[in-house]
Each structure stands twice: as structure tokens, then as C-alpha cells.
Image (cartoon, rainbow, N blue to C red):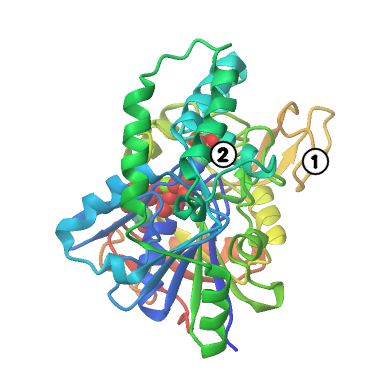
Amino acid sequence: MSKVDVLLGLQWGDEGKGKIVDVLAPKYDVVARFQGGPNAGHTLEFDGIKHVLHQIPSGIFREKTKNVIGNGVVLDPIVFRTEIEKLQKFNLNIKGNLFISKKATLILPTHRLLDQAQEKAKGDNKIGSTLKGIGPTYQDKIGRQGLRVGDILSENFIEKFKKLTGIHFNILKDHDIQYNWPELEKQFLDAVHFLKEFKLIESEYFLNNELKKGSSILAEGAQGSLLDIDFGSYPFVTSSNTVSAGACTGLGIAPRNIGEVYGIFKAYSTRVGSGPFPTELLDEQGELMRKQGNEFGSTTGRPRRCGWIDLPSLKYSIMINGVTQLLMMKADVLNIFPTIKVCTKYQLRDGSVTDMLPYELVNEKITPIYTELKGWNASLSDISDISMPAELSQYIDYLQAELGVPITLISTGPDRTQTVYRQAINV
Ligand code: GDP
Ligand code: IMO
Ligand code: MG
């Protein structure tokens, strides 16, 4: 029996998961998304074209890879239809290679309206949600009243839909949210019709059968560990388990069938939306990082907050996920920085120093303690592991020693080809 490898972000999302899943996909028979939904924006670049995927797994461009949307995902049929239509001109075998769990939960247009209403009601404490309906849809799932993909095949789907939207309208009437329901309803029901043409399956059987056959499976995380509903900077988090354990519940894979856990991180940090960010740079250096890294949200276009790398939070993510290999992204963004700072510890309000994340992360005043390393001040186009600038090697060696997990891959640009293996990744 083979194993499921898991690839996930160790920071606040947007680490470059889409690029690396696309790079690794030829090694895998199956790529599967296990949580999140259209709040994700996973960017892939090759042949001079940039693609952003929201719900479709990032193995879709590889002819031989099967792609699964697992039961832990929340799926918006309208977004799904738009995504598929955008891909149509690339002549991919999507109908043959895409499998959708009947147990994935449906995002209804009213979930998006509720997301807006909830954010508005929070005023200054808003989460900075992508407003894709993620929170309200997971609320309905946990509240045992959600609709699932499999329900669209049932005769009384419209009845179920009307019942749930009725509950939502009752809540919405107390909020000042404008919408044109007949239009939204039509758009949704048309998209549901479209969704019926795809392979709607019991994905837990499908995936476990693939394992029995010896197929290799890569689980593709969305968001990042610091946005996890249990372990992230609550309440400034998303509504799913983004950590490796989420791959078990989100796909129906037993814990003992998890193999490698690839942890992806940027050579610095970013965050989009509200919430604590200890190493955030609010000065021109942060501005420079944003410019160099083109740090604008793939889903919402919002500018991402930028700052130095944060070892206490990375160590925490590595611990929770059981990371076996680290992949460092966007090294090239630091090319022009003469000095690179690394946060090694936090000083708390009472003067104590720690390398642990305090429970009161949201209300605690954290002062990062930095170590400085010399920058490489060189372009990274055309580098290999052997020709790497000495200062970049030192940076990688330093991080690896601090984090205690091998850094096996370095990404030096958005394109598929801008990838340097420090160690072969064998599947
Ligand atoms: P994801 O959500 O984790 O898939 O990441 P996003 O796609 O939201 O954000 C990552 C952004 O960085 C995208 O625009 C990628 O094209 C880009 N990117 C990925 N790897 C690199 C890299 O090594 N260098 C640079 N400069 N950009 C990269
Ligand atoms: P990928 O998969 C970065 C953030 C939002 C907000 C919080 C809650 O591309 O890395 P939600 O819409 O889930 O209710 O928003 O989480 N967020 C992300 N940030 N990357 C993502 O996905 C994100 N998905 C959600 O900005 O702060
Ligand atoms: Mg993203």
C-alpha cells in the first residue's frame, strides 16, 4: 500500500503551494484538495501563461494526473463553472481527470451574503474574509444543516435548497445587505446543472482504492497553518483545519497512511486580512518586499502585509504538521536586501523572552528579537545548488539548523522551471 503525501503552507497562506503542486504533480498519480474552497488562490506559471486556481486542484494541467476535490472542501458551483470555462481553451481532459466528492459541502449564494453581513457586523474587528462564504458554509456543515454535492442528484434538491435559503433569509433580514435574489438563484441553479456533468463520487473509496493499487497521492493544502481554525491566530483564521490532520478528515485517509509532509514557506512572511503579524514591516522595507514579491492577493487583489521570516511561528507549524521536508519559496524577492533579518524569539509585554507562540497572540504585545544575516545581493536567475551565492547558502543552512528539518527545494521565481532541488524529492 502506498501513502498520501501532504503539501501545505506553514505561514498565513500564499506561500506558493499552487506552483509546487504543479511542479511535483508529474510524480503523482492523484492530487487532492482536502479543505477550504474559493478563498484559495493558487498560482501556476508556465509557457509564459499565469493561471490562478481557486477550487480545482493544481494537478489539472498534467495530463496523467487525476484530481480530486475531497469531502472537506466547500464548493461554490458558480465559481466552479467560471473556473472550468476559463480552462476550456487549454484543451485539458478535465471531465476525465476531475473527481468531486459527493460529501463536499455546497456554498450557496446566501452563504456569501451571510459572510458579508457577519463581517460588516464585526466593524473594526473584521477578519478580512475573502467574502466567498467560507465561514457560513462551514457553520452550516458543523450545524448539520448544510447541503452537499451529492444532494444535487436527489429529487427534492430544490426543496432542500429553499429550506436552507429560508433559514438564511431570516438572518439576513436583520442586516443591511443589498442583493438581487432571482438573479443569484438562477445563476446558482444553472451552475448546479453544470456541476452534474462532472464525476461526482465517493472519494474516500476512490482514494483508498488508489492506495491499494499502489498509486501515489499528493494532498494539496489551502490557506496556511497560522490560519487553521484550531491552531491559527483565532479568531483571525479561516474556518477549516488547514494542518496535515485535515488531510485525514478531508479525504478519508487514515493517519497511518500519511507519508511525507512538505511544509512550504516564503523566505520572508506575508499575511492578507486582519490579525496578528509579529514581524510585519510598516515601513519602506515592507513596501519594497511587496513590490519585489508582487504581494497582492490572488483571490481578492488586496495588498498583502509583508515582514521578515518568523522562526517561532514556523517551528510551531512544523510541530503541529509533522513536517518532514521544507520547501523555501520566493528567495529571489530578497535579492536586493543588503541585510536579512530573522526573528528567532519573541519578547512579551512582561519582558519575558520565548520561542513559543503565546496563547494571547491577538492581545499580547510582541516585540520580535532579530538575528541579522548578510544578504546575497545577486540575481538568482540560472542558479543551481552548486552555483548558489554563498550568503544564500548560509541563509538556508541557518534556517535548516534552527528548524531541524531539511530544506530540499528552493524556488527562485514564479515559473515552473525556476526551481532548485537541494535534494532529490523521490516519490
Ligand atoms: P498559494 O496560494 O500558496 O498557491 O500562493 P499564491 O499563488 O497565492 O501566491 C504566490 C505568488 O508568488 C504567486 O503570484 C506565484 O506566481 C508567485 N511565486 C511562487 N513562487 C515564487 C518564487 O519563487 N518567486 C517569485 N518571485 N514569485 C513566486
Ligand atoms: P491560499 O490557499 C491567504 C485569509 C483571509 C482572511 C482569513 C479568513 O491562496 O493560500 P476566509 O475567506 O477564509 O473566511 O478568510 O483568511 N485567507 C487567506 N489568506 N491565502 C489564502 O488561501 C487564504 N484564504 C483565506 O484573507 O484573513
Ligand atoms: Mg493564494
Q: Position of residue 74 (x, y in %)?
A: 51, 48
Q: Residues within 10 Å of mark 2 (few under 14, many from 20)?
A: many
Question: Mark 2 is on which residue type?
Answer: Thr
Q: Position of residue 169 (x, y in %)?
A: 54, 21
Which mark is drawn over residue 252? none
SS class, disc 1: strand
Quadrant of the rendered structure where residue 71 is?
A: bottom right
Residue at mark 2: C-beta within 8 A of ligand 2: no
Give the residue at x 75% y 28%.
364
Q: Is residue 14 visible?
A: no
Q: Residue furthest front?
A: 155
Question: Mark 1 is on which residue type?
Answer: Val
Would you say 345 lies left or right of 302 here? right
Would you say 49 lies left or right of 422 here? left
Give the residue at x 63% y 56%.
243
Q: Image height check: is 24 above or below 175?
A: below
Give the residue at x 69% y 39%.
143
Quadrant of the rendered structure where residue 370 is?
A: top right
The residue that mark 2 highlights is 137
Does label 1 or label 2 sit earlier along the sequence?
Answer: 2
Say which of marks 1 and 2 sits in front: 2
Which mark is drawn over residue 353? 1
Residue at mark 1: C-beta within 8 A of ligand 2: no
Q: Position of residue 49 (x, y in %)?
A: 19, 55
Q: Position of residue 366 (x, y in %)?
A: 71, 32
